[in-house]
Amino acid sequence: MQKAHAETGKTVKTGFWRDAWHRLCKNKGAMLGLFLLLALILCALFAGVLAPYPYDLQDYSHTFEGPSALHLLGTDNFGRDILSRIIYGARISLLVGFSSIITAIIVGGLLGAISGFYGGRVDNALMRAMDILMSIPGMLMAISLAAAMGPGLANMVIAIAIADIPGYARVVRSSVLTIKDQEYIEAAQCIGASDSRIILRHIIPNCIAPIIVQATLGMAGAILSASSLSFLGLGIQPPTPEWGSMLSAARQYIMNYPHMCIFPGVAIMITIFALNMLGDGLRDALDPRLKN
Amino acid sequence: MSKYIGKRLLMMIPVLLGVMIIVFTINFLTPGDPARMILGDGATPEALAQVTEELGLNDPYLVQLGRYIGNVVFKLDLGESYMTGKPVFEEIASRFPTTVKLAIFSVSISVLVGVSAGIISATKQYSIFDRIATSFSLLGVSMPTFWAGLMAVLIFSVKLGWLPASGSYGPEYWVLPSFTLGLHSSATVMRMTRSSMLEVIRADYIRTARAKGQKEKWVIITHALKNAMIPVVTVIGMQFGGLLGGSLLIETVFAIPGLGKYIIDSISTRDYPVVQGGVLLLAISFSLVNLLVDILYAYLDPRIKSQYKAAKKKKGGAKNAESTC
Amino acid sequence: MENILEIKDLTIQYRADNRIVEAVNQLNLTLGKGESLGLVGETGAGKTTTALGIMGLIPDPPGIVTGGEIIFEGEDLLKQNKKRMRSIRGKKISMIFQDPMTSLNPVMTVGSQIAESIRIHERCSKAEAATKATEMLELVGIPGERYGEYPHQFSGGMKQRVVIAIALSCNPELLLADEPTTALDVTIQAQVLDLIVKLKKEKQTSMILITHDLGIVAEVCDKVAIMYAGEIVEYGSLEQIYNHTCHPYTKGLFGSIPDLDSHVKRLSPIPGLMPDPADLPAGCSFCPRCTCACERCESENPQMIEVETGHFVKCFQIGKEEEHV
């Protein structure tokens, strides 16, 4: 898999990314995913403008209302507008998704790169440690970490990131190992390129493609984990609008006011769907050999 | 084969030790004073100090870790619950079967639905069935488990009134949770089976089988399936881990008195020994399932087995091959 | 002599992304009983597609047989139903594939892969099939006790022997050998080829040997057909093709072989590449690379002409030369 990136990436670097972009554009699913994701990012950035009401505006004369012209997705037990809370919720979800993935990529990528470069004992020790981390199901790991650290945004990000680290470490390590053995790296060494040049010009660019794919799909997982933690009361606490904690609060009213339960879930689903579609599309686009 | 299994079992020891270290460390770093948790807020400083000393909480990290591992390995002692004062091992052991039952039901549904839908989808690529199944699986993997559970409750309990929404008092209470978890994970299994099957169906040896005049049905069953299942088995193993994690959520949604719900409840009551013990048990069961998967893997793929066979035999085989050919 | 196989105007297309690729274009070929025909051409000329067409194993989609007849022992294979085709495949016509590394199922023992073919076509018990499969293994030079071993335990040459054993297990009337030695080491190539020739003689099988190696053809075949861009451009006996080479493409092929007897400084390769099979030239498909092409070649597709008894050439220039003489 990395071989293909490596070869194409090396000969014409800009061409590789342009080709990948063209392939991505041809993929309708990926384009739908990208469109949805951009829409979500816009929602998150301009929540203040887009949301019809402040997310914490309580209106006790209009509690538990179903969808209406005034409140498109209805109101909750405090009379807050659900649509506005969902729009603001996009901020939290995307923030948690991005930051936990970035943390995991930096730490995991570093560990993986060290493992791959130095090999031998360092590699062995690090990879066994990653194996052990991976032998605990990710969700379970995140839950116990979140339980130990207590609720809150930062703690949740850390909990999710730690559970994700081994995955990135493995991806980066295998990329580095594959690329290290490529003949063009040897060729670069032969013509006297410095180590730092090899790392900057060859190894890092060629690790990027698999990392992008893993990160896109991983972000879906991170957002899912975040909403699960919040649903269990281990993540974002009310009144901050988070989709999972909205569902957690809505749960007890499911008998009489199901609309409270439906829409936040739909929001999660659309987000995950968009990221999955985009991730699958990126994988196909960045790995020409897989295309059949 | 037994040699292979033995080797795998030996390889599990460091993994299990590592899991214990992680679980203990997470708990060690948790803020809060266990002595105060046990005695309550009204305790005197002397009493607190005494309990702290009894529990060995003044010892350095490594000593405490060693004692913890020793207690777990040799005495099955996971400490005592702050809430009930009973041994944690008894508490979680009584709830664990419920979780295992839920996991087994769900995995069965997941494999049954996921694998068969994947096979049909792959053999009839681009058919209506394939399109519907792939769309459903896409939606399935995009859905959070707990929300799927909520929606199942909404449709089948609240609106249709067919099945009970929560609790565990009879077989009918198991239907919604098992199907929610099972169908949810079947989406992933289906996607994997489909792509693996599609790859295998194009393989040269499938063409060889067809060239023998074999019936298409048997080409799929005897030739394609066994090869295609190799990566699927790995995914099923990983799904099992997902199901154990998911059981925490699903048991909470459906109020099933299993280990998952017990862990979540204990988190909110800060009954950390229980959380620690429960997480450890789930992590160990996941490792055991992975062991089973590895063994199954070796059964499915003869190439794995021979890697573990004595190198002598392999060499002999190669030599033989050269000399005769 | 009685013809075992007659192919008339066979056309096979591959369709993908609105592109139609003419893999086999109005192909005509006859094969007498007991004869060996060498089907020679560059990679992509449609040799394998022709063989798969005879087997009824064109992957659909994207491949479609759009026209023509394949008459085998008096019946048109293209008109047979699936069941009838299955009873012919492996029993009456069988095929040896190019790459022995991927042609065998990695998770089945080699013995059972041979026995499978016997079980499909012959009414016999499992044990009888196994005995016969062991005999087949011995016949291709593999000790019978390796029956229970898996393909990965065999070398490339040994695997190809297993593939040959599968192909010959039911004493087929017609054997299609698709570059059976290309993927093997040079030293093994001769052994495998000798084995095929020996078994073919013993069992009186007719054979189509697909290759791009004119040396192999000279050793093994009675008749030769030169294929270019989906068409037969020259067809005749071994002697006719090698000593009275007519078509410029055939001449080019011979010019590309180094000859130890004559000291030429350089080989004379055929200039250019095969035309894009999705966009064939209007006239003769070899015209763009031909050294003696004229205007007529560009616009008009030549017909096969018989230059001497049983020697056919598809080229305008040949007719001209005759006229001049």
Image (spheres, rainbow, N blue to C red):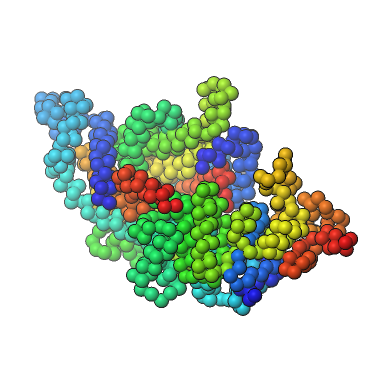
Residue C105 occupies which quadrant of the picture? bottom left
Which residue is pictured at 77% across the width and 62% down the height? C314
Q: Quadrant of the N terminus of chain C?
A: bottom right
Along the line of sight, the residue nearer the viewer: A267 or C214: C214
A129 vs A36, left or right, is: left
Observer able to see residue B269: no
Q: Quadrant of the C terminus of chain C?
A: bottom right
A143 vs C317, left or right, is: left
Which residue is pictured at 51% across the width and 56% down the height? C192
Total count of labels: 0
Outermost residue toward the right?
Answer: C324
Along the line of sight, the residue nearer the viewer: A186 or C5: C5
Which residue is pictured at 68% across the width and 64% down the height? C237
Residue C245 drawn at (x, y percent)? 74, 57
Above or below, comparing residue B63 to residue B315 in the picture:
above
Residue A223 drawn at (x, y percent)? 44, 42
C203 vs A120, left or right, is: right
Residue A161 drawn at (x, y percent)? 40, 35
Along the line of sight, the residue nearer the viewer: B109 or C232: C232
Which residue is pictured at 43% across the width and 44% down the height? A221
Residue B89 occupies which quadrant of the picture? top left
A175 vs B182, left or right, is: right
Outermost residue toward the bottom?
Answer: C74
Along the line of sight, the residue nearer the viewer: C282 or B117: C282
Observer able to see residue B47: yes
Residue C290 drawn at (x, y percent)? 79, 52
